[in-house]
């Protein structure tokens, strides 16, 4: 047993080392795709001033992509742990539809020229705050009245998502054409057009959520055994679950408002990490999932830039993630 444990530790270290090397390569590839590759394509000289100017936009984008990918992976793993399912993701609760709905209501009530919409910092705080408030109201009311029934919470989230999406579509149809165009531009957030001005507002929140969840990795190890076993081992399960859902709602709200919806990135990263690491220890799963998510997003974006792809990397990730979700459903034959 001791020998097997040592072999597992060595295997984990090797996997993390390979992942670190791939991450460095993907970052360098992304920088190359934004600088010298673009200069070669346009047949222009990449001098020092041009390189500095491009890097001034590239570095914040890299930080935003990396932090958002890590955050999505971490909260997705925590969500799967408390729900006891490898198939579920936090996006099923409807964060993307609440994001679109909030932006639509802001423009419908105050116009696209209002400070609440045009000021990126104020708009980000309003949108992220609304998403956290809605999700926590939903958690509080449903979990209190339905004895922590997470399945009911997920079903309610899916229904709420449909209602908000339909309401947003209706408001967009009846609003002014210019306002409609502004809403579409604001809600079509992707890695390519993320607002780099708000990254340094979002970054402290992202780091805080990631740090808190990493510090609680031993609690998640116990919670993964199920409610009854966790309670018998001294974990206040309901309290920990509600606090985790709060962290998840904050994390998903911040990430969605920054780079848009990435519904299946967390699902992919977490499940691949489980297959590679073969462990129940969340400290390793958190690190592995975070590294894989960052690698997928940054390397994918670099390849899209190099190939001048018209399809955003988020669409490709969601397509692969959705296919993998179907595979998991067929494999496990349960949700």
Image (cartoon, rainbow, N blue to C red):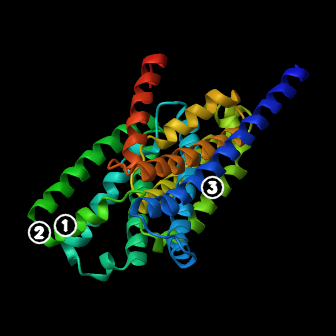
| Separation (CA) of disc 1 from disc 3 | 35 Å
In the rendered image, residue 79, in percent from the top left (x then y), is placed at 53, 41
Side of 212 relative to 305 (left or right): right
Determine the secondary structure under disc 2. helix
Q: Is residue 191 visible?
A: yes
Q: Which residue is mark 3?
A: 210
Q: Residue 232 or 287: which is nearer the viewer?
A: 287
| Separation (CA) of disc 1 from disc 2 | 6 Å
Residue beneath the point at 40% across and 29% down: 323
Residue 321: image quadrant is top left
In the rendered image, residue 236, in percent from the top left (x then y), is placed at 66, 43
When the figure is inspected, residue 45 is found, relative to residue 66, above or below; the finding is below
Residues at circles 1 and 3 in contact by the CB criterion of under 8 Å: no
Residues at circles 1 and 2 in contact by the CB criterion of under 8 Å: yes
In the rendered image, residue 85, in percent from the top left (x then y), is placed at 52, 30
Q: Residues within 10 Å of mark 1 (few under 14, many from 20)?
A: some
Residue situated furthest right in the rendering: 2
Determine the secondary structure under disc 3. helix
Q: Residues within 10 Å of mark 3 (few under 14, many from 20)?
A: many
Circle 1 or circle 3, nearest the eye: 1
Q: Which residue is mark 2?
A: 177
Mark 1 or mark 3: whose residue is earlier in sequence: 1
Q: Which residue is mark 1?
A: 181
Q: Residue 30 or 215: which is nearer the viewer?
A: 30
Q: Residue 222 or 85: which is nearer the viewer?
A: 85
Residues at circles 3 and 2 in contact by the CB criterion of under 8 Å: no
Mark 3 or mark 2: whose residue is earlier in sequence: 2
Residue beneath the point at 78% across and 30% down: 11
| Separation (CA) of disc 3 from disc 2 | 40 Å
């Amino acid at each position: 047993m001791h020998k097997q444990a040592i072999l597992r530790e060595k295997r984990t270290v090797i996997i993390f080392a390979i992942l670190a090397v791939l991450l460095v390569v993907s970052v360098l590839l992304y920088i190359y795709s934004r600088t010298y590759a673009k200069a070669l394509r346009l047949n222009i000289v990449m001098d020092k001033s041009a390189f500095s100017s491009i890097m001034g936009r590239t570095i914040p984008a890299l930080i935003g992509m990396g932090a958002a990918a890590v955050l999505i992976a971490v909260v997705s793993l925590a969500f799967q742990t408390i729900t006891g399912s490898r198939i579920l993701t936090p996006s099923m609760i409807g964060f993307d539809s609440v994001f679109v709905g909030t932006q639509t209501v802001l423009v419908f009530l105050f116009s696209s020229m209002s400070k609440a919409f045009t000021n990126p910092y104020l708009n980000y705080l309003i949108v992220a705050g609304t998403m956290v408030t809605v999700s926590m109201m939903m958690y509080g009311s449903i979990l209190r009245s339905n004895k922590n029934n997470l399945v009911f919470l997920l079903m309610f989230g899916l229904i709420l998502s449909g209602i908000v999406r339909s309401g947003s579509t209706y408001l967009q149809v009846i609003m002014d054409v210019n306002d409609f165009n502004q809403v579409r531009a604001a809600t079509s957030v992707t890695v390519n057009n993320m607002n780099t001005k708000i990254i340094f507002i979002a970054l402290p929140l992202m780091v805080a959520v990631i740090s808190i969840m990493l510090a609680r990795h031993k609690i998640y190890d116990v919670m993964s055994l199920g409610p009854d076993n966790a309670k018998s081992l001294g974990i206040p399960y309901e309290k920990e679950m509600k606090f985790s859902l709060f962290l998840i709602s904050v994390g998903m709200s911040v990430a969605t408002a920054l780079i848009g919806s990435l519904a299946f990135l967390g699902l992919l990263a977490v499940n691949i990490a489980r297959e590679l690491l073969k462990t129940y220890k969340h400290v390793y799963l958190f690190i592995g999932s975070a590294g894989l998510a960052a690698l997928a997003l940054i390397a994918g974006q670099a390849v899209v830039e190099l190939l001048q792809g018209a399809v955003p990397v988020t669409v490709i990730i969601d397509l692969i993630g959705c296919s993998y979700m179907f595979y998991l459903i067929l494999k496990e034959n349960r949700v």
